[in-house]
Amino acid sequence: MILAQQTMPLFDWTWVGRNLDNIWDRTLEHLKLTGFALVVGLALSIALAALALRRPRTYEPITAATGIMYTIPSLAVFALARPWFGIGFVTAEIALVSYTLLILIRNIVAGINGVPPGVREAALGMGYRDGERLRRIEFPLALPVIVAGLRIATVTVIGLVTVTSLLGLGGLGFFILDGIRRSVIFPTGIIVGVVLSVALAAILDLALLAVGRILTPWTRRDAV
Amino acid sequence: MDQEGCRLMEFISEVMVWFSEDGRWTGSDGILPRTVEHLWLAILPMIIAAALALPIGVWLGHRRIGEFAANAVVNIGRAIPSFGLIILSGVFFLRAGVSLRFWPAVVALVALAIPPIFTNAYAAIVTVPQETVEAARGMGLTEGAILRQVEIPVGSAVILAGVRISFIQVLATVPLAAVLSSGGGLGQYVVRGFAQGAGARAEVFAGALLIALLTLAADWAFSSSERFLLPEGIRRLRPEEVKAAASVS
C-alpha cells in the first residue's frame, strides 16, 4: 500500500487535462454555495443591524447569539442540522450563512456608528429624514467598513464550502475529500481543490476591493 | 401524538441510548478519551504556534517593521481552507511514511494557529502610543525593558485576543482531522457516522453536540479567565475599555 502511494505522482497534469469540465462544474458549484450564503447572510445581517441601530440595547444579545453561531464548528453545525433539513444544500447553507452573520453585523453597525456626528447633524440641518439620511448619507459613508466585512465573510465562506464535501456537495472540496478517500490516495485532486479554492478566495477578495473603490470614489484619493 | 412528534421522540431516544451504551464514556473509543485527544490536538499546536509567532510578532512590532508581512500572513491564513490544509498535510506525511493519526493534524493546526497570534501580537505592540515608548526611553529603560515593562503589558489585551481567536479556530478544526485517520478527537463520531449513512444518525448528532459544547465551553473558559491573565493595571480598566483595546484587530 505504501509502495503504491509512493509511485503515485504528486501532481498529474494529464488528469487535470482530462477533467477540465469536471473541475469547471465544481468551481461553479463552489461559487453557487458561496454566493447564496453571502446573499442570504447579507440580507439577514442588514435586518439585524438595522434593529441594533434603532434599538441599541438589542446589539449585545444579537452579537452574543451570532457569536455562538460563529464559534460552533462547521462540522458540528452540519451534523446538528442534518436530521431536520436532510443531507444537502439547505443543511450546508445553514452552516455557511451562520458564519457570515457576526462579521457582517459587526461591520455594518460599526460603519454606521462611525459616521462623524458633524456629518449627521449637517444632514439633519439640510432636512434629510431618518430613512433618507441612512440611505443617502450614512450608508455610503459606512460602505468601506461594510465592504471590509463582506470581504472577510467571503473568504471565510469559500474556505468553509470545502467542508460541505462531507455532505455530498463541497464544490472544489469534492476533489479534496475524493483524493483522500480513494484506496490509493490521489494527491493531484487534493492539490487542485486547495489551490483553486485559495485562488477563488483571492479573486473574489480583489473583486470586492475593486467594487468598494468604485462605489466610494471619495476614498480613493488618499488610498495608496 | 402526531407522526412528526413520534419520529422526534424516537430520534431523541436513539441519541440517549447512544450516550448510555457500554463503554461509551471511558472505553478506548469513549467520550472521555476522545475529549482528551480533542483538547490535546488543539493545545499542543497552540503551544508550538505561540512559541513561534509571539516572539517574532512582538519583536517586529517593537522594531515597527514588517507591516506588510503582518497583513499578508492574516490574509493568506484566512484564504487557505483548513480542511484542505489538514488533508494536504496528511498526504505529505503519508509519503514520508509517518502514521496519519497525530502529526499531520498537529502540523496543519500549527499553520492555522499562527496567523491570528502573529498579527495580533504585532498590532498590539505597534499600536502602543509612540509617546509612551519615547517616555520610557527617556527614563533610561533599555529596549528589552521597554518591551517587557511597557509595550507587552499595554498590548496584553490585544495579544491575548489573538491567542483566543486562534485557539477557538484550532479547536473548531480538530474534528476535521478525523477524515484522515481514526483520530480527530470527538470529530471521529461525526465523520465516521457521516460515512456510515442513516444508520449512524444518533452517533453523528451526539458527536456534534459534544463538539459544540466543548468549543463553547472552551471559549467561555478562556474569556472568563482572560481578565486574570492580564497585568493589574490593564485589569483595573472597565471591561468595556479592555474590550475596546482588544478589538483593534
Image: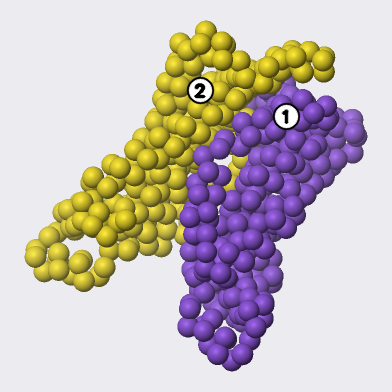
Query: Which x, y percent locates residue B133?
Result: 54, 81
Query: Residue A11 occupies which quadrant of the picture?
Result: top right
Residue at 23% across / 45% down in the picture?
A214
* Chain holding disc 1: B
In what element is the residue under mark 2?
Answer: loop
Query: Which x, y percent locates residue A167?
Result: 58, 22
Q: Nearer the viewer, mark 1 or mark 2?
A: 1
In what element is the residue under mark 1?
Answer: helix
Q: Is residue B5 above or below residue A55?
A: above
Q: Is residue A67 above or below residue A75?
A: below
Image quarter in which the N terminus of chain B is found: top right
Tag 2 residue: A171
The colour one sees for chain B in the rendered image is: purple
Query: Residue B41 occupies which quadrant of the picture?
Result: top right
Q: Are marks 1 and 2 on the same chain?
A: no
Q: Disc 1 marks which amino acid?
A: Phe
Residue at 45% across / 31% down in the picture?
A200
Q: Looking at the image, which is closer to me, B10 or A65?
A: A65
Query: Which x, y percent locates residue B58?
Result: 61, 66
Tag 1 residue: B92
* Chain holding disc 2: A
The colour one sees for chain A in the rendered image is: yellow
Mark drawn on residue B50: none
Q: Is residue B54 above or below residue A190?
A: below
Describe residue B27's horizontal placement relative to residue A146 as left or right: right
